[in-house]
Image: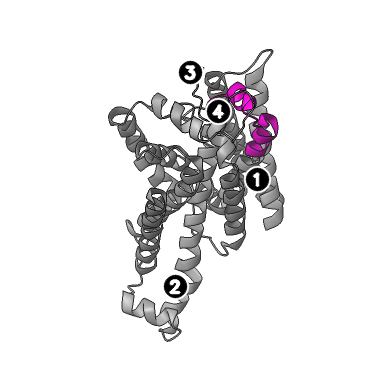
Amino acid sequence: MRALTLLAGLLLVTCISLLISLLSGSVAINWQELLAIITGNGDPLQSQVILDLRWPRSVTAFTTGALLSLAGALMQVLLRNPLADPYVLGVSGGAATGALLALLIGLGSLGMHSAAFGGALFSMLLVFGLSHGSGSWTTNRLLLTGVVIAAGWGAVIGFLLALSPEQGLRGMLFWLMGDLSFATSPTPGLLVLLGGLLIAVMAGRPLNILTRGEQTAASLGVNVLPLRRLIYLLASLLSATAVTLAGSIGFVGLIVPHMLRLLGVRDHRLLLPASALLGGSLLIIADTLARTLLAPRQLPVGILTALVGVPLFLLLLHHGRSLHSEAPGSVNTTEVTALLPQNGPGKARGEKFSDSK
């Protein structure tokens, strides 16, 4: 019941955010006029503004925020570290580099998406490969490697921009800072989101057990290696899709899972869809502010997410419960016990684990 209440509340927040986004802009439209447009009796100009501009942009904003939040939650489970997200680990940078390279070459939408996915996957493999070294990798080493790789992608992006024609340079810069002004059809991104969310929720139970560590998960019957590979690929695909939709947007995948964990949401079968709803709603609000604060001029939405995300994350660090205790690797013993299979190998149902790792 509590899970349904939370999801219903987040769905209501999403609907309210969409409504505010549709009604806000340089062309004033009230809710009666919006209702007339929905029923097909609205003013032609207002109908064009809503159906051709604001609706695709709002849905794209929701899809992008949901993709980033879902990817961030999965990476935090994978690394058992609360600081992991596509932006910090350089996955977004790799995807942006691939997409920008595809733009410069002149590839179409499919080529751009493929290049972004390839860049994201290559970046993730590079981070994990370099952080592993001659021994086993640690989360601290992996995060440091991710930060360095992200800086490297930034240099590559700067080099590509230096080679870009001047007439398209401003648009590329806006896109790299997070730009939804060219959003047209959100359908491909929505399909990726729905498919990725379905796969992630289906893997929710083994993900809950994986938070206790790979050895514990393996002893309980979880096939760890295929699960890790699935999360690698899924997080890369989600990040790449978000980058192709709106460029590089930071802090959404980092902040949203923390906000939910501070509310006591630990079960990934609830955390993952809740992250998608909350992340999508937050990016809708951020995009609405980006196009209305300095209207008719528009701000890159990535600037607003950074301006809000940095102090919000510091606030969560200062006032929230310890991020280490709230991290994906700190699931309560009784919670893990309740998630065990009926006759999991190594432990009978109802036995408890030691909290030592």
Amino acid type, label 1: Ala
Question: From the viewer's perspective, is the residue at label 4 or at label 3 nearer?
Answer: 3
State the image coordinates of residue 212 (x, y, percent, origin top left).
53, 26
What residue is disc 3 on?
354
Measure how far apart labels 1 and 4 are at the Cα level.
22 Å
Location of residue 320 with respect to 269 vertically, above or below: above
The outermost residue toward the left is: 319
Q: Residue at x 51, y 33 (%)?
A: 76
Amino acid type, label 4: Leu
Magenta stretch: give its range: 210-232
Amino acid type, label 2: Ile
Mark before the other along the chain sequence, 2 or 4: 2
Alpha-carbon neighbours of circle 4 within 10 Å: few (<14), some, or many (≥20)? many
Q: Residue at x 35, y 25 (%)?
A: 322
What residue is disc 1 on?
116
Alpha-carbon neighbours of circle 1 within 10 Å: few (<14), some, or many (≥20)? many
299, 54: nearer the viewer: 54
259, 7: nearer the viewer: 7
Give the quarter of the image for residue 18.
bottom left
The outermost residue toward the bottom is: 41
Mark before the other along the chain sequence, 1 or 4: 4
Task: Tell me the number on the disc at residue 79.
Answer: 4
Question: From the viewer's perspective, is the residue at label 2 or at label 4 nearer?
Answer: 4
Secondary structure, mark 3, is loop
Secondary structure, mark 1, is helix
